[in-house]
Amino acid sequence: MSYEFYPDADPETTSVDGEVRRIVSPGNPWADVHDGDGTEAIDDSPLRFIYIAGGELTNTWRRIERCISLFDTSSLPDDLTINNASLFVWIERFADSLEIGDTFAINVYSSNPASNTELIAADYGTLGTTAYSSNFYYDSLPGSAVGDGVYHEFVLNATGIAAINKTGITKFGLREATYDAANSAPAWKSNLGTGAGIGQVEKGTHKPLLKINFPSAVGDPGYIWVEGTQLHWLDYGGNERSYEGTDTGTNSTVSYFWVEGTYLHYTDSNGDERRKEGTAEGATGVTAGFWIEGTDLHYIDANGDERYIEGV
């Protein structure tokens, strides 16, 4: 069971994603490019970049690029225990090989942009250096041509999970891990760089996704199961609750439970399909999933609206 969140597409209402970068020409010392003020921010493009590039002059650098992704997670239940969560990001080849930095990698970090809905150049300096996941290495990208990529799952560690804001905006950043986050310049090469394209929300099917999983083991609060003709769950008080849906007269080939239109469907122990329509609450920012809130079972219907069913 999970909640799924995406940044807003341009124009944003609650949560932005995009790129912040510092570019100098023909190049400056590493410390200046790494720690100096950002020079540009872009938050309305389907593909942005994690990038490091050497300058023309010996041991100079001309470009570092980082990405920021925010998620409006204010609709999460206050009493939700988050045991695991992942950030899914599209990563693609910007070049067909590593030009600098043999261990060029990407990871997830904190960010703290000045606004939740618009990036500015100064946000370049707000990304943290504590990794929220395991590194994804450029040389592990599939294929060999520019544009070959993967929708990679960054499984968040305990620090990353703790950064999820159940009452507001969750703020993540992506940056190069081995050199940029570690503040350790790679071996310099004149006017060469390594970069990876990062899919933004405007990219559509490859937009950033924050997926928060809640407990689903037998006996855990939030666990949902079928027993006889009823759908059961454990609320966060540890109490078992249930309801009995109306028999649709269909012998279902779909297992467990799912959404059709405004109804929550499930297959009972006899193999019969049942359904019940929850009370509508309207659009709330959650885009998919099933979860327990208080004593009620909530779900997102096919129209994107939240509905809930009261258990007995």
Image (cartoon, rainbow, N blue to C red):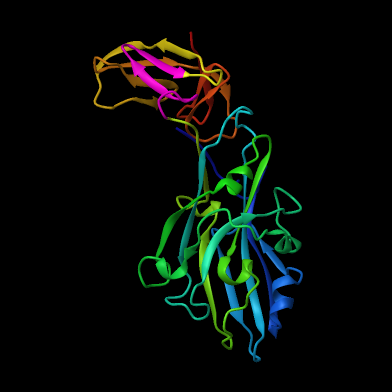
To which quarter of the image does residue 41 belong?
bottom right
At horizontal 72% and vertical 53% (from top left) the residue drawn is 112
Q: Is residue 67 above or below residue 146?
A: above
At which x and y percent is residue 22?
Answer: 69, 71
Between 193 and 100, the residue placed more toward the observer is 100
At which x and y percent is residue 208?
Answer: 52, 51
In the picture as drawn, the residue positioned furthest to the top comes out as: 312
At horizontal 61% and vertical 27% (from top left) the residue drawn is 79
Q: Is residue 12 above or below residue 287?
A: below
Between 101 and 65, the residue placed more toward the observer is 101
Number of numbered markers: 0
- Please identify the quadrant where the N terminus is shown: top left
Magenta stretch holds residue 195: no
Which residues, given as a range, are shown in magenta?
217-233
At horizontal 53% and vertical 27% (from top left) the residue drawn is 305
Is 66 placed left or right of 91 in the picture? right
At horizontal 55% and vertical 83% (from top left) the residue drawn is 192
